[in-house]
Image (spheres, rainbow, N blue to C red):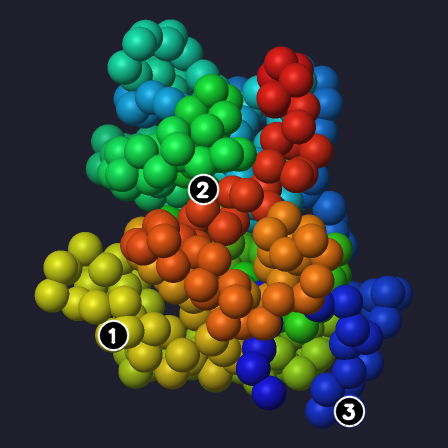
């Protein structure tokens, strides 16, 4: 049975004898790699209010990034649900994107806001908090931000398509078109496996509970960096099933983490391979689908993180969107969906995604001028 991605399959989660409950167990019985067992902090959704000052005087350093326009930090961060998942968050009132980075066992808080805007570029103000703040560490976090915000992806051909598209022509107006991801493909793959065959609310809970295995930012006990594969392995199957409620996915997650730890699968090389013009999308898909728990739709979705958008990620939400937008409410076949988007060639999955995204409240609010 193919595995489908994200918030799109609302069937009850039952597989291999496990049934997911909405009630989490007490976690005092589990042993964690850090001093305090994490609290069950399931929600990292967008919140309102100003960006508050912490109760500490952690060392901080400021940097700037340049984003080629059209670019809106809000539109990019809220381009899909990753911002609800650890270690990312979005502050609506402060218009601030936050991500928790790590260097070895130390966690750092990285905050991004918009700065000065010109006709061709937008300045992004970056603040890194933590210690030690060695230049090499800060520069690595800044490079990671470029990947997280897809700043280096050339979307000129995509925006050409948008100009002639009946609905996507508004994307440049609101600075949309790019999408957030984790800089680490290992992290992206674990999260994608959590998002298969389950509604999005439950997927977020799974991801955030796994995220609590990572090191904590000093003075911010609810802010964790993403755990390493070794830390996830140390937590074990019982934690993944009983606390994270990942159900049958535990086996796939642990197998993948084991393959990464023992260097049987190098997921961090996928970005380098994707930049090689001699490596085809089929080559990348073969590698992604070799990971247990990654089916065709999930693999096509992950392919977009690698800058390849020539394979449609078709799931129940995609089918519903196409029926509503293109086929007068009639359920389309997979071949029909492929025919509809074939005209967009290497950008067809991004076109399909942002057609759907424009129906979200986030996009509607931005189109109404309420930035």
Residue 170 seen from this side: yes
Residue 179 disc label = 2
Instruction: Tell me, yes or no, whether the two marked residues, 1 and 3, touch with CB atoms within 8 Å.
Output: no
Q: Vertically, is 127 above or below 232? A: above
Q: Residue furthest front?
A: 328
Alpha carbon separation for disc pair 1 and 3: 35 Å
Residue situated in front as seen by the camera: 349 or 113: 349
Marks 3/2: CA–CA distance: 36 Å
Give the residue number, with chain letter if any, for mark 3: 17
Mark 1 Cα shell of 10 Å, populated few (<14), some (14-19), many (≥20)? few
Q: Is residue 286 above or below residue 73?
A: below
Q: Residue at x 34, y 73 (%)?
A: 285
The x, y position of residue 91, in whole percent, is: 63, 26
Q: Earlier in the sequence, mark 1 or mark 2?
A: 2
In the image, which disc is placed on residue 198? none
Q: For the residues marked 1 and 2, what is the alpha-carbon distance in whole angstroms?
A: 23 Å
- Residue 308 position within the rendered picture, expressed as x and y whole percent measured from the top left: 31, 56
> How many neighbours does mark 3 have within 10 angstroms: few (below 14), some (14-19), or many (20 or more)?
few
- On screen, residue 201 versus residue 74, left or right, reads right
Point 61% across, 22% down: residue: 366
Which residue is located at x 71 percent, y 18 percent?
49
Q: Which residue is mark 1?
A: 283
Q: Does label 3 or label 2 sit earlier along the sequence?
A: 3
| C-beta proximity under 8 Å, tags 3 and 2 | no
Identify the residue at image location x=66%, y=39%: 359
């Amino acid at each position: 049975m193919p595995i489908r991605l994200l918030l799109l399959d609302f069937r009850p989660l039952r597989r291999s004898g496990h049934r997911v409950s909405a009630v989490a167990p007490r976690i005092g019985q589990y042993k964690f790699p850090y001093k305090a067992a994490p609290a069950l902090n399931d929600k990292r959704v967008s919140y309102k209010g100003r960006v508050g000052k912490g109760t500490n005087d952690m060392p901080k350093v400021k940097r700037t990034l340049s984003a080629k326009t059209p670019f809106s930090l809000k539109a990019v961060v809220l381009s899909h649900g990753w911002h609800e998942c650890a270690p990312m968050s979005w502050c609506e009132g402060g218009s601030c994107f936050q991500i928790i980075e790590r260097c070895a066992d130390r966690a750092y808080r990285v905050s991004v806001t918009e700065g000065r805007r010109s006709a061709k570029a937008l300045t992004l103000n970056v603040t890194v908090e933590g210690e030690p703040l060695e230049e090499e560490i800060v520069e690595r976090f800044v490079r990671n931000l470029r990947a997280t915000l897809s700043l280096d992806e050339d979307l000129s051909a995509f925006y050409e398509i948008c100009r002639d598209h009946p609905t996507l022509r508004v994307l440049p107006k609101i600075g949309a078109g790019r999408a957030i991801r984790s800089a680490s493909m290992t992290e992206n793959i674990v999260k994608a496996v959590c998002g298969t065959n389950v509604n999005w609310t439950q997927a977020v809970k799974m991801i955030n509970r796994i995220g609590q295995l990572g090191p904590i930012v000093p003075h911010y006990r609810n802010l964790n960096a993403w755990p390493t594969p070794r830390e996830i392995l140390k937590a074990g199957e019982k934690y993944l099933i009983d606390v994270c409620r990942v159900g049958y996915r535990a086996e796939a997650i642990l197998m993948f983490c084991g393959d990464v730890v023992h260097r049987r699968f190098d997921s961090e090389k996928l970005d380098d391979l994707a930049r090689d013009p001699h490596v085809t999308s089929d080559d990348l898909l073969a590698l992604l689908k070799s990971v247990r728990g990654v089916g065709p739709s999930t693999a096509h979705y992950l392919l977009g993180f690698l800058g390849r958008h020539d394979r449609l990620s078709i799931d129940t939400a995609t089918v519903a969107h196409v029926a509503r937008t293109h086929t007068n409410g009639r359920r389309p076949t997979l071949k029909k969906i492929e025919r509809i988007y074939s005209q967009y060639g290497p950008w067809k999955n991004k076109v399909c995604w942002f057609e759907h995204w424009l129906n979200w409240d986030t996009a509607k609010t931005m189109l109404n001028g309420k930035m």
